[in-house]
Image (cartoon, rainbow, N blue to C red):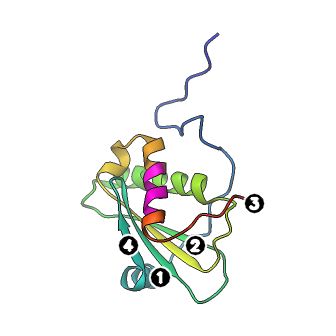
Amino acid sequence: MAPPRPEPGCPDPGLPQHGRLPPRLKVRAEFLRAAAHGRKAAVHGLVLQALAREDIAPLRVGYTVTKKVGNAVVRNRARRRLREAARLLLAGRPLPGLDLVLIGRDATCARPFPQLVDDLARALAKAGVTLPDPQ
């Protein structure tokens, strides 16, 4: 019997399915601080802004998609895909004192999900963020 096929838009069954979302950036000033002082890395599916803070608080991640990408449905889909990619890649990894902002692009929704996760990993490497082994 063939293995069950995932529903369209679901994460690749070959990717790990564990972990919780890291805490979120919520205040506009935190997004602006990351944009002004953080390192930027643009890849095909997203733009990453990484800011090293002066504390040892846990990693925080913010997600944003501009209206240029599409209507509210398209923007929310892009944000959900970015959130899930971050969960799969960052959950359980200690990255204290770091703020990340993930900015969705037009290609965020159209990109196959495993490639989007790979885009996030490449953007983190370009921004100088080394991922420790999961705990």
Residue at the image point whose x is 65% and y is 59% from the top: 91
Image mark for residue 40 = 4
Q: Is 102 placed above or below 56 here?
A: above
Three-letter amino acid code of the residue under disc 3: Gln
Identify the residue at image location x=52%, y=56%. 83
Residue at mark 3: 135
The range drawn in magenta is 118-124
Nearer mark to the viewer, of 1 and 4 = 4
Tag 3: Cα neighbours inside 10 Å, few (<14), some, or many (≥20)?
few
Q: Earlier in the sequence, mark 1 or mark 4?
A: 1
Q: Which residue is under mark 2?
A: 60
Marks 1 and 2, how far apart in space? 10 Å
Q: Quadrant of residue 122?
A: bottom left
Of 39 and 13, nearer the camera is: 39
Question: What crowding class fits label 4: few (fewer than 14 Cα within 10 Å), some (14-19), or many (20 or more)?
Answer: many
> x and y percent of residue 11 in the render?
54, 40
Cα distance between the residues tagged 1 and 4 = 15 Å
Q: Could you tell me how far apart the alpha carbons at marks 2 and 4 are, in whole angstroms?
A: 16 Å
Q: Which residue is mark 1?
A: 30
The amino acid on which the numbered mark 4 sits, given as a three-letter code, is Lys
Q: Position of residue 23 (x, y in %)?
A: 61, 69
Q: Secondary structure at mark 4?
A: strand
